[in-house]
Image (tube, grey):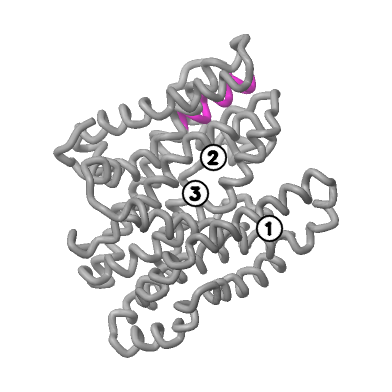
Amino acid sequence: MDQKERLFYLDWVRIIVILLLVPFHSAVTFTVHGDGFIKYPQHVRSLEYFLWFLSIWIMPALFLVSGIAAYHALQFRTAAEYARERRSKLLLPLLAGLLLVCPPMAYLRALYMGTFQGSFLRFYPHFFSEGPYPQGNFNWGHFWFLAYLFVFTLIMRPLFARARREGLRQGLVKASLVLERGPSIYVVAIPLMLTETILRPHFPGLQNLVWDWANFVLYLVLVFYGFVFAVNNGILDNIYRIRLFSLCFGIVLFAVAVAWRVSGVARSMAPVFPAYNVLMVFAWVFALMGYARQWLNRKSGLHTYLNTASFPAYVFHFLPITATAYLIAHSDVSPWLKYALTVLLAYPLTFAIYECVRRVPVLRSLFAIRAGRRGV
């Protein structure tokens, strides 16, 4: 977008979410949940709750913002240009990640679990030849997001292209007027509450693209919602106005969910929990967007740097987490100290990798990184 019109706070929503992925994926190491490359036998209960809280809304926030970004990108590109840009910024980094980032993480996991002994060069062919984890070594880790978003681009492209026409734009605005009226915006949760109730029990979330229909529908609809929100600016204004309501609503919903789990009634609530979770998704995403607009809707040097570095940080952050977790796995320190070390080391190492890669033209192109003039 033009810098005078740019919604800087939406950049910050994406930046905040990506920065939170470091403590999020570091916490996976200490819980039974999530798909981490290194999983410790020590489980920290409080980190499980922290992981659960973040898992509710961080990826939905990214998909919603991606839909908003798609609308604004198409104001300056044709549909064909947008599709080409998505191939270079999503598909190419996905392939590069599978070739260069995931294999060393899988190698460290194999060493940790004792399923392989030898050098990384000897292991590398085994990453591709023995099938997907856990039977084999292949695992695309956090790169699933790029695959899903690229497929959503292909699916939504006809709508995105037609939305450039004034008639369809006006139709979308009229159809979404109810979303400008305070908490009535939460009616967008109803379709997803239905799909989650139907699909989630059968597809708990493998994120393998082909047999993950609950997540697929949830994230696809969120991209569509983001696009509609961008078409009708009144919706984004309403999200800002009800930010306190959304924050309080989110706190109450999560507190009740925690009480269910602590009291042991979570099993009996299982049939309704997928729909309940959708309400938590929107409450926390709307709260984040509203307060980001209040506090962060401005340009700054930090914004300029992190806005360029956020995508590479997403691509590379899991590698130093995995390496650190592997190196300190057998050290005789408390789980909390291990967690703190993992987080504190992962941040500078992630940005160090980014700073190195962006200076190598071939790697920079593979990972869709802008050269940039500003350094750390």
- Label for residue 203? 1
Residue 247 appears in the picture as rendered: yes
Q: Quadrant of residue 312?
A: top left
Badge 1 or badge 3: first in the primary sequence: 3
- Residue linked to disc 3: 144
Q: Quadrant of the C terminus?
A: top left
Report if the CB atoms under discs 1 and 2 are less than 8 Å apart. no
Question: Residue 47 at x, y = what percent?
Answer: 63, 34
Q: Secondary structure at mark 2?
A: loop
Q: CA distance from mark 3 to mark 2?
A: 9 Å
The amino acid at mark 1 is Phe
Residue drawn at the location 70% of the way across and 33% of the way down: 45
- Residue linked to disc 2: 139
Question: Residue 291 at x, y = what percent?
Answer: 42, 55
The part of the chain drawn in magenta is: 103-116
Q: Quadrant of residue 73?
A: bottom left
Q: Magenta: predominant secondary structure element? A: helix
The amino acid at mark 3 is Trp
The count of marks equals 3
The amino acid at mark 2 is Asn
User: Is residue 105 found inside the magenta-colored segment of the image?
Assistant: yes
Instruction: Look at the picture and state if 160 lies above or below 216.
Output: below
Badge 3 or badge 2: first in the primary sequence: 2
Crowding at mark 2 (Cα within 10 Å: few <14, some 14-19, many 20+): many
